[in-house]
Amino acid sequence: MRSALRIDLGLADFTLLVVGTIIGDGIFVVSGFGAQYLGPAQLVSWVVAGVLSALIGLAFIQCAAIRPGVGGSYAYVEAAFGPTVGFLAGWALYLGELAALPVFPLAFVRYLGYFVPLKSPVASLLAGGSRDRREPPRRTLRRTPERCADDRETRAVAAIGGGRRDIRGREARTRGAQPRAVRSAPLGWGGFGTATVLIFWAYAGFELAVLPVGEVVAPRRTLPRGLLIGIAVATTVYVLVVLTVVIGLPWQDAASSSRPVTDALDAMLRGLGLPSGWGAAFISLGALVSIVGVCDAFMLALARLSYALAAGGSFPSIFARLEQRHVTPWVGLVFQAVLAVGASLIFDVAAVLGTAVFFLGLCYAMTALSALRLVQRAPELALHVPGLRIVLLLAAVAGGYLAAQASITLAASGVLALLAGLAVYRWRRDVWRAGIAGAADRPGDEA
């Protein structure tokens, strides 16, 4: 209950919490995709993705301010629209996070390759999957005369740069940087939506900041201020890092690099005549640590989500089983681990992120609409935000925009997956709910 919690989190505490839930491995995972679709103009997508996350985040904290005793978008949607729509929100959230799991082994292999040659069959397969999307899509990169000239220039610079201490190589890189500064959008803006969807993944996690909402001082005022300040800080950090990539590497090199942040720092240090190996190694090591840490938290959070859905009778009851010694939802963890490794051998990073953001966008839209309805029911708990209802409506539009960037094939497949899950839920929900009591009675299933 709310009264049992220590209410001592101020504005600074909540702001740091928001920053901590956002900044992680995302910048290492998606920093090259913006260059593939937009070139240097990817900076615009990073700012837009930050704005979208701020809008959607306000919807989450509004829901949490009204219902602080429950967590998760599925619980908010269920409170606003009933159990069936609540299941759809939870199912979309689960599918989105499940689809994103292969990102972690794929990204880990990318940065591990800086230290260890990828000679094992499994590592080679993982590395092959991560390389699939490093070649920009044909529909985005049109073969214009200017593009062909850029390609010839890039190959020439790469050939000259083979001798890292060759002065002529530095001069060639300097000449190659001049057109980048003039032509900030060499690929046009046709790939803006796709780039923004992939970049948005770096901001995912802001919704977790609402979990300790019951411990925040003056939540109606502190929550929106802390969220906006925290996302502004995260966006600034991301833009500065990406600006380093834009300055340090020709956009063609950034688009084809599996480790653009590392390569950009390496190029900048070499350009300054400084030792580059240690800096690049430090960034790669930091990326590995970040990826492992976020993967661990992500796996546990997703297993807890499947456990909560199962415990509420919206998921197969087997996912509600807990390992007795450590009290962990072991069924979900095992299922996720097997799926993550298997899917990483088949799909590439861009494909899994596009799928994940499609489902998450739908979940975000439903959460924002739920916030609108909950505010109508309890206007006295509305956040102190000017034009709050308009902001929440824009948050729903933002979630819909993210989902709408999916291809027709992906959108159709996603809708079928949602409808299939709904059909199974309507068919089996009574059995699942009946199985919860039986699972609790079996030794080793519940703590």
Image (spheres, helix red, strand yellow):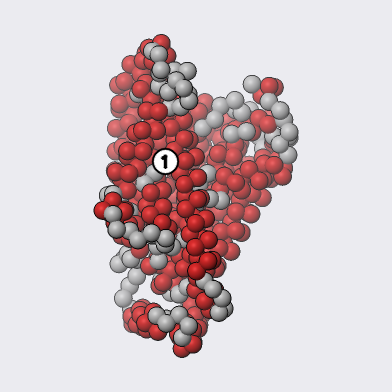
Q: Image point 45% across, 80% down: which residue?
A: 164
Identify which residue is drawn at 72% across, 30% down.
7
Q: Secondary structure at mark 1?
A: helix
Front in this rendered view, residue 199 or 334: 334
Question: Residue 437 location in percent, x, y?
Answer: 41, 12
Residue under the image location 45 percent in, 65 percent down: 260
Residue 234 in which image quadrant:
bottom right
Q: Residue 11, percent across and down?
A: 72, 42
Q: Is residue 343 left or right of residue 239?
A: left
Is residue 55 in view? Answer: no
- List the single residue furthest toward the bottom: 168
Percent across and percent down for residue 186 are 43, 74
**Residue nearer the viewer, 102 or 216:** 102
* Residue 164 seen in this snapshot: yes
| Disc 1 target residue | 97
The answer to whether residue 155 is left or right of residue 29 is left
Q: How many marks?
A: 1
Which residue is rendered at x = 35% and y = 22% of the image? Answer: 318
Occupied quadrant, residue 101 = top left
Circle 1 Cα neighbour tier, 10 Å, few/some/many (<14 / 14–19 / ≥20) = many
Residue 285 horizontal side relative to residue 120, left or right: right
364 w.r.t. 87: above or below: below
